[in-house]
Image (tube, helix red, strand yellow):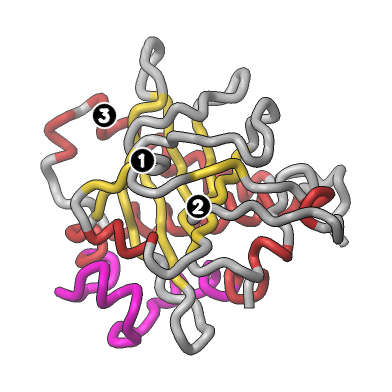
């Protein structure tokens, strides 16, 4: 069992910080955004999403309960950043994964994340969010160019461990259960957490394929590169 006093390792901190610095550079230099994203940068996006999930699960105060993960049909891990000194949380990136009919989890598929209303933690420069998808249909909404969390599908704050592990607790019925480190939110509260968009060009670069989100999520036509395997193994281990 992980101690509630476990501290985030410097390595994990660097994993999560580097992609945000790179993304901020894109905001501050619009011409860079027009260029093709380097594959090494995309790998850091996947690695930072793995680090975020590890962070959440390491701390009992933020860990997604096993009872919730047992019903997960998909996971979306999002890392968003504060663009500049006077702006709110405007942009970011993430990955989506789905549980295939075989019981195995898919490749992590890269997505873009837009403005969120979940807010920054005091003194923080980023917002880390995990969305648990509880049905098979919600993930497919991302096949559109833009998917609005809490609008196109209902999203509510998911229960924490003490609640979900209570045998008398009635599990929340919603297609998206959202987990954030913001201590001021409560289970069952409705959220509108910005929007997500497809990132087909980035996935083509990362996986060296012309297949797009539907095939990457729901087929086994692309062999997982070594860089994404740790995240796939982590998700398979916590949500078998």
Residue 213 is situated, as x and y percent measured from the top left of the image, at 26, 67
Give above or below for 49 relative to 225: above
Give the answer, above or below, for where 133 lies relative to 63. Answer: below
Is mark 3 in CB contact (under 8 Å) with mark 1? no
Distance from the alpha carbon under mark 3 to that under mark 1: 26 Å
**Alpha carbon distance from label 2 to label 3:** 29 Å
Q: Position of residue 212 (x, y in %)?
A: 21, 69
* Residue 224 magenta: yes
Look at the image and give the residue range highlighted in magenta: 205-233
Picture coordinates of residue 138, whole percent (x, y): 39, 60
Residue positioned 83% across, 58% down in the render? 165
Which of labels 3 and 1 is toward the front? 1
Cα separation between marks 1 and 2: 11 Å
Mark 1 touching mark 2, by CB under 8 A?
A: no
Residue 27 tag number: 3
Q: In this view, does 239 lie to the left or right of 18?
A: right
Q: Earlier in the sequence, mark 1 or mark 2?
A: 1
Q: Is residue 159 left or right of residue 77?
A: right
The secondary structure type at the circle numbered 2 is strand
Q: In this view, does 131 lie to the left or right of 89?
A: right
Q: Residue furthest top?
A: 86
The residue at which mark 1 appears reads as 151
Secondary structure of residue under mark 1? loop
Residue placed under numbered mark 2 in the picture? 176
Image quadrant containing the N terminus: bottom right
For disc 3, the neighbor class at 10 Å (few under 14, some 14 to 19, many from 20) is some
From what the image shows, is residue 123 above or below residue 237?
above
| Label 2–label 3 contact, CB within 8 A | no
Tell me which corner region of the image, top left, top right, bottom left or bottom right, holds residue 35: top left
Q: Which of marks 3 and 1 is nearer the N terminus?
A: 3
**Residue 120 in magenta?**
no
């Amino acid at each position: 069992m992980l101690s509630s006093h476990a501290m985030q390792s410097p390595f994990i901190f660097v994993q999560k910080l580097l992609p945000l610095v790179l993304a901020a550079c894109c905001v501050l230099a619009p011409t860079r955004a027009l260029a093709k994203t380097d594959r090494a940068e995309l790998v850091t996006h996947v690695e930072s999403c793995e680090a975020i999930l590890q962070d959440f699960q390491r701390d009992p105060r933020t860990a997604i309960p096993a009872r919730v993960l047992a019903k997960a049909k998909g996971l979306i891990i999002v890392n968003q950043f504060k663009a500049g000194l006077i702006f709110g949380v405007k942009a970011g990136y993430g990955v989506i994964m789905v549980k295939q009919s075989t019981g195995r989890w898919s490749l992590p598929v890269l997505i873009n994340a837009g403005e969120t209303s979940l807010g920054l933690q005091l003194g923080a420069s980023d917002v880390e969010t995990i969305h648990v998808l509880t049905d098979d249909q919600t993930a497919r909404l991302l096949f559109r160019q833009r998917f609005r969390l809490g609008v196109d599908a209902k999203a509510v704050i998911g229960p924490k461990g003490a609640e979900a592990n209570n045998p008398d607790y009635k599990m929340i019925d919603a297609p998206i259960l959202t987990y954030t480190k913001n201590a001021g939110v409560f289970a069952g509260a409705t959220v509108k957490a910005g929007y997500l968009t497809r990132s087909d060009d980035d996935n083509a670069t990362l996986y060296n394929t012309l297949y797009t989100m539907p095939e990457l999520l729901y087929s086994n036509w692309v062999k997982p590169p070594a860089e994404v395997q740790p995240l796939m193994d982590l998700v398979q281990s916590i949500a078998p």
